[in-house]
Amino acid sequence: MPLFALDKQLIFPPVHHAEPDGLLAIGADLSVDRLLLAYRSGIFPWYEGEHILWWCPDPRFVLLPGELKISKSMKALLKKRYFDFSINKAFTEVINNCKTVSRKEQDGTWITEEVKKAYTQLHQLGYAHSVEVWKEGELLGGLYGIRMGKVFFGESMFSKVSNASKYAFICYVQQLQSEGIQLIDCQVYTEHLESLGAKMIPRQSFISLLHELI
């Protein structure tokens, strides 16, 4: 399949035209309207160098909130309320940490200044949300993503101490489930999220769920 080069026109190619690795298109911008159209369509951006790449993998890695797995050790931490949990209290700090905290599986970060600006704008408009966990007033872990309809699209998470991001994720999934969220998009496979109950589903099933839930 050819790689589609996007221009100023607000449109994406059909997702079944994506490369085997999920790469669908290149270029354009991170405007609010384009990002919201992308998420509704099952597409997400990921930078490689200076280029915006747009992806729609098949299969897709997702979590159904009712299938969340909580280990005995995490249940013990939750019972003790080991961390303080909050939502949308420190969006800028969360995205900054997601940008700078090193990860074993990544050489660098895809979160550029342009990404920070775009998602901060989405946060101000009520689409992007942050989750934080704290200990004695210090931010130790969290995540952020996009919420549309009954779907939450996870973007990135960070942890400064053991179990912090996992604690944040579990608490937030439970909160989302109580508010009627039925699907959490994890985008691509990680062992970390698989241990929490995430699984692969066919891209077409994912797209169908988006049409139903957004």
Image (spheres, rainbow, N blue to C red):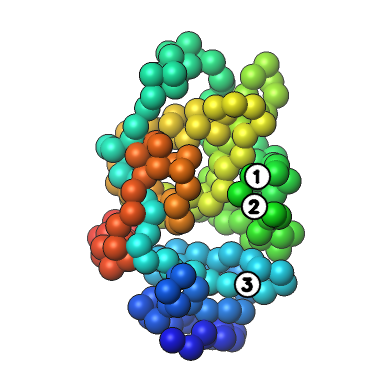
Where residue 122 sits: x, y (%)?
Answer: 57, 56
- Mark 3 crowd level (few <14, some 14–19, many ≥20, 10 Å Cα): some
Q: Earlier in the sequence, mark 1 or mark 3?
A: 3
Question: Disc 2 marks which amino acid?
Answer: Gln
Q: Residue at x 72, y 72 (%)?
A: 50
Q: Is residue 92 visible?
A: no
What is the distance, in whole Å, between disc 3 and disc 2 at their CAs? 18 Å
- Residue at screen point 44% across, 22% down: 74
Q: Residue at x 65, y 41 (%)?
A: 94
Q: Which mark is residue 106?
A: 2
Viewed as shown, does residue 203 lie left or right of 93? left
Q: Is residue 155 above or below residue 180?
A: below
The reply to whether residue 81 is in sight is yes
Above or below: residue 200 compared with residue 54:
above
Left or right of residue 92: residue 130:
left
Residue 123: image location, x then y, percent: 58, 51
- Give the distance between the C-alpha atoms of the residues marked 1 and 3, in whole angstroms: 21 Å
Q: Secondary structure at mark 3?
A: strand
**SS category of the residue bearing label 1:** loop
Image quarter of the N terminus:
bottom left
Q: For the residue marked with disc 3, what is the amino acid?
A: Ile
Q: Considering depth in this image, is 136 or 189 the residue closer to the camera?
A: 189
Mark 3 highlights which residue?
A: 52
* Residue 49 position within the rendered picture, expressed as x and y whole percent measured from the top left: 71, 69
